[in-house]
Amino acid sequence: MECNDINCPEHGRLKTKGATFYGSVISDKMNKTVTVQWPRKIYIPKYERYQIRLSKIKAHNPPCINAKMGDYVKIKETRPLSKTKNFVVEEILGQKEYVQIQHQELLTKTEREKAKVKKTPQIDESEEQ
């Protein structure tokens, strides 16, 4: 299939930079646009627990990739394409690849949060006197 889209990262002139996210397509009703959603963990210090929240972003869907609802995709940041679109779909992933990537990201975030909690300063009694 030939791609004539200028805003395609592979066949067009669109440059990608910055953030990369992996998520699932929850809507493909708009023309050349998909809505991508993924979970993230937020640490709540008061309760010393993690809360799962969802992030949603609209991304450009080139005709050569043509992601459908339910697909797992990789999106990358780019220049603003419209008022709400700053990302473009780079590739479609399989479910197994997506689960592995999400698991790795959540583990690294959890390890970072634990490191923050452990780095609280300890005051020695000998220093106070």
Image (tube, rainbow, N blue to C red):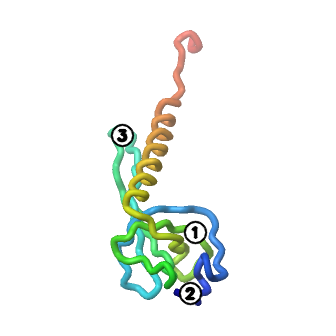
Circle 2 sits on which residue? Answer: 3
**Label 3: how many Cα within 10 Å (few below 14, some 14–19, many 20+):** few
Reading the image, the residue beneath label 1 is 77
Q: Earlier in the sequence, mark 3 or mark 2?
A: 2
Lateral position of residue 123 relative to residue 27, left or right: right
Nearer-the-camera pick, 24 or 124: 24
Q: In the image, residue 34 lies at what x, y percent?
A: 43, 78
Which residue sits furthest front?
1
Report helix, strand or loop for mark 2: loop
Percent of width and height locating residue 94: 40, 64
C-alpha separation, residue under disc 1 versus residue under disc 2: 20 Å
Tell me the residue at 47%/50% (across/down).
105
Q: Nearer the viewer, mark 1 or mark 3?
A: 1
How many residues crowd mark 1 within 10 Å: few (<14), some (14–19), many (20+)? Answer: some
Front residue of this view, candidates 62 and 52: 62
Q: Which amino acid does the dot numbered 3 rest on?
A: Lys
At label 1, the amino acid type is Glu
Q: Can you tell which mark lies on residue 46? A: 3
Element on which disc 3 rests: loop
Of the pair 55 and 47, the residue shown nearer to us: 55
Q: Earlier in the sequence, mark 1 or mark 3?
A: 3
Give whichever of 10, 59 is nearer the camera: 10
Q: Amino acid at mark 2?
A: Cys
- Measured as percent of width and height from the top left, residue 44 is found at 38, 44
Residue at position x 40%, y 66% in the image: 72
| Residue 17 x/y as whole percent | 64, 66
Residue 14, quarter of picture: bottom right
